[in-house]
Image (cartoon, rainbow, N blue to C red):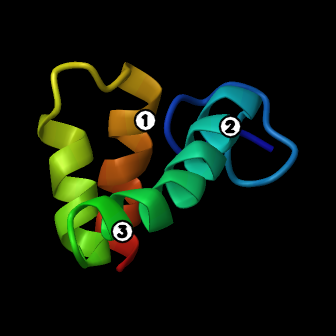
Amino acid sequence: MKCKLCEKQAVTDLCSHHQSARENLEAAYPRWAKAYGGIGWEEFLDNVKRNVQTGRWAKEVAELLERDT
């Protein structure tokens, strides 16, 4: 099976790099929601994508999750 985002070998729908980024995003969301006083999932993903400190894999996963929402 190939990764949906980069065509690397994957066990699930994502390669290990993109899967790790997805897990990190999902784990970070509650902290962001608390820090921002209640931020929605879509707004969180938009902020992640626009943040210059966000890595390529996380941005790609945020775009994928945004499309799937």
Q: Mark 1 and mark 2: span between their CA atoms?
A: 9 Å
Q: Which residue shows up at 35% across the image and 80% down it?
A: 69
Mark 3 or 2, which is nearer the eye?
3
In terms of sequence position, does the residue under pointer 3 or pointer 2 come before the other? 2
Residue 16 sits in which quadrant?
top right
Task: Give the answer, above or below, for where 69 lies relative to 66.
Answer: below
Task: Tell me whether the residue at label 1 lies in contact with that at label 3, contact meaning CB atoms closer than 8 angstroms.
Answer: no
Residue 34 relative to residue 16: left or right: left
Residue topped by disc 2: 20
Badge 3 marks a residue whose secondary structure is helix
The amino acid pointed to by label 1 is: Ala
In terms of sequence position, does the residue under pointer 1 or pointer 2 come before the other? 2
Mark 1 or 3, which is nearer the eye?
3
Front one among 55 and 14: 55
Q: Residue furthest right?
A: 11
Task: Name the spot of residue 32 as percent of width and height, x first.
Answer: 35, 58
Q: Please rate how many residues cluster around mark 3, counting C-alpha atoms within 10 Å: few if below 14, some from 14 to 19, many from 20.
A: few
Task: Name the spot of residue 64 as percent of width and height, x first.
Answer: 39, 56
Residue 25: mark: none
Residue topped by disc 3: 34
Badge 1 marks a residue whose secondary structure is helix
Q: Which residue shows up at 43% across the image and 35% down it?
A: 58
Residue 68 sits in which quadrant?
bottom left
Q: Please rate how many residues cluster around mark 1, counting C-alpha atoms within 10 Å: few if below 14, some from 14 to 19, many from 20.
A: many
Front one among 9 and 20: 20
Task: Tell me whether the residue at label 1 lies in contact with that at label 2, contact meaning CB atoms closer than 8 angstroms.
Answer: no
Q: Mark 3 and mark 2: span between their CA atoms?
A: 22 Å
Residue topped by disc 1: 58
The amino acid pointed to by label 2 is: Ser
Quadrant for the N terminus in the image: top right
The amino acid pointed to by label 3 is: Lys
Q: Which residue shows up at 23% across the image and 71% down it?
A: 42
